[in-house]
């Protein structure tokens, strides 16, 4: 199974105190795939105004912003478990639909076989 975290969008305050282009919210997505199956979770994470070290907007990395999300309430382990469960439920559905037991199932329709005979009466 492959799990991939991405930041889809950043909401930015043009000025916050003496800083410019301060990220206040990140929209994230966690995607999982296995063979033809997939699962996803997404959400937003808001941040307090920066204190201490400040990274200019143009120097931010996706990994850095994802770490901010994990440090501010996004439960990486729980979300990855949710995505994994979505995929596992597709592979082994926990609930299925069966035919109603009191409704007769029609018998399969037999398709007549056609025999093609080549025309050998060449002139």
Image: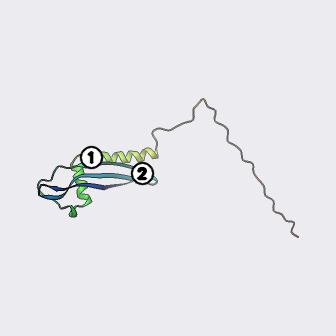
Pinpoint residue 107: horizontal percent, then vertical percent. 67, 38
Left or right: 36 as drawn, with respect to 118: left
Instruction: Report if residue 76 is visible in the image.
Output: no
Residue 6 in the image: state x and y as whole percent.
Answer: 31, 56
Side of 58 relative to 86 (left or right): left
Q: Which residue is mark 1?
A: 75
- Give neighbour class at mark 1: few <14, some 14-19, many 20+ (Cα, 10 Å): few
Most extreme residue toward the bottom is 123
**What's the residue at 86%, 69% (across, down)?**
122
Name which of mark 1 and mark 2 comes first in the sequence. Answer: 2
Front residue of 58/15: it is 15
Q: Residue at x 42, y 53 (%)?
A: 34
**Identity of the residue furthest to the top in this view:** 102
Query: Which structural element holds mark 1?
Result: loop
What percent of the width, then of the height, locates residue 61? 24, 61
Which image quadrant: the C terminus? bottom right
Colour scheme of the rendered structure? rainbow
Distance in Å between CA atoms under marks 1 and 2: 20 Å
**Picture mark count:** 2
How crowded pointer 2 is (Cα within 10 Å; few <14, some 14-19, many 20+) is rated as some
Residue 86 shown left or right of residue 103 in the figure: left
Give me the residue at 76% from left, 53% from top: 114
User: Label 2, on which residue?
Assistant: 38
Query: What's the mark number on residue 98?
Result: none
Q: Position of residue 21 (x, y in %)?
A: 19, 58
Residue at position x 22%, y 61% in the image: 60
Q: Find numbered disc 2 in the image and state the secondary structure of the residue it sits on.
A: strand
Q: Nearer the viewer, residue 89 or 103?
A: 103
């Amino acid at each position: 199974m492959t799990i991939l975290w991405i930041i889809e969008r950043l909401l930015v305050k043009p000025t916050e105190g003496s800083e410019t282009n301060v990220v206040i919210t990140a929209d994230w997505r966690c995607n999982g795939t296995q063979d033809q199956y997939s699962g996803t979770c997404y959400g937003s994470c808001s941040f307090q105004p920066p204190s201490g070290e400040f990274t200019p907007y143009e120097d931010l990395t996706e990994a850095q912003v994802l770490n901010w999300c994990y440090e501010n309430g996004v439960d990486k382990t729980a979300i990855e478990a949710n995505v994994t469960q979505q995929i596992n439920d597709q592979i082994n559905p926990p609930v299925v639909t069966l035919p109603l037991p009191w409704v007769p199932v029609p018998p399969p329709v037999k398709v007549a076989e056609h025999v093609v005979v080549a025309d050998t009466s060449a002139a």
